Image: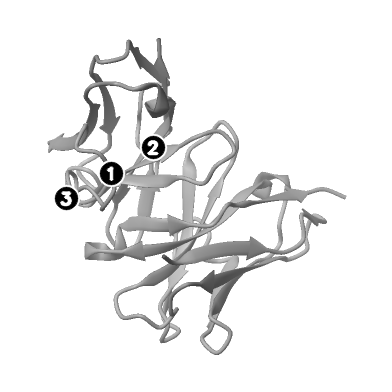
Amino acid sequence: QSALTQPPSASGSPGQSVTISCTGTSSDVGAYNYVSWYQQRPGKAPKIMLYEVNKRPSGVPDRFSGSKSGNRASLTVSGLQAEDEADYYCSSYAGNTDYVFGTGTKVTVL
Amino acid sequence: QVQLQESGPGLVKPSQTLSLTCNVSGGSISTVGHYWSWIRHHPGKALEWIGYIYHSGSSYYSSALKSRAIISVDTSKNQFSLKLSSVSAADTAIYYCARAIGLAAAALDSWGQGTLVTVSS
């Protein structure tokens, strides 16, 4: 399985929105609505932000939203805050009990 | 709130077997619908799913690592383990244990802090 493709970086000013894409194939992102997004701050463990494309776990602000179209999933962070500065990774179920992660995107709050 | 903590040697020699254990606290490893996972992260690269195990002992592995990885569970100790054989420098990474939930067990909702394993002679 090849890693899902994410842009290396994204940025925005406080209060703005930033959208991160996650591009896979018809065998993973395109085939299943099992896309998750994780936030990882330096030196910390990843934290789940979204699962099953657009579901938020308890405690995740509704500023975080997700969508999917074809082989591409997206994470949008609205009302950007300084605490949102982190690396973000997507993941997808790829069938046959296999999973694939994205290459990661560093979000910078300007 | 469940907490996970990895433990094991930080240095492994090439061709030997990497062994890590994940201790689960604050919840039972036997909870229905929870799958106990191993993931690794090579710095600067994508995270990589290694595999997971259910409390029954059923285990599943990534196609890339299934020939070398074995995940086991000890419900009496509320912990699960990873063994990765025939390691090389390419296996140097931060190893995380995590809990997978949801449809297709595709959501990793709790993670350990991670442990760096270096493969070097």
Q: Are marks 1 and 3 on the same chain?
A: yes
Q: Which residue is mark 2?
A: A89
Q: Which residue is mark 3?
A: A33
Residue A64 position, x and y percent, is 23, 34
Which amino acid type is marked by label 1?
Answer: Val
Decide if residue B60 is in sight here. Answer: no
- On-image quarter of the C terminus of chain A: top left
Mark 2, chain letter? A
* Number of numbered discs on residues: 3
Q: Residue at left 41%, top 87%? A: B56
Label located before the other in sequence (2 or 3): 3
Sequence-first disc among 1 and 2: 1
Q: Residue at x 25, y 64 (%)?
A: B102
Mark 2, mark 3: which one is toward the viewer? 2
Residue at mark 1 shares a chain with residue at mark 2: yes
**Left or right placement of residue A52 versus residue A41 in this view:** left
Looking at the picture, which amino acid does disc 3 mark? Asn
Q: Are marks 2 and 3 on the same chain?
A: yes
**Residue farthest along the left direction in this orientation:** A69
* Disc 1: CA contacts within 10 A as few (<14), some (14-19) or many (>=20): some
Give the CA distance from mark 1 to mark 3. 20 Å
Select label 1 or label 2 by which is in front: 1
Residue at (58% x, 84% y) in the render: B77
Relative placement, left or right, of B109 versus A40 is left
Q: Nearer the viewer, mark 1 or mark 3?
A: 1
- The tag on residue A60 is 1
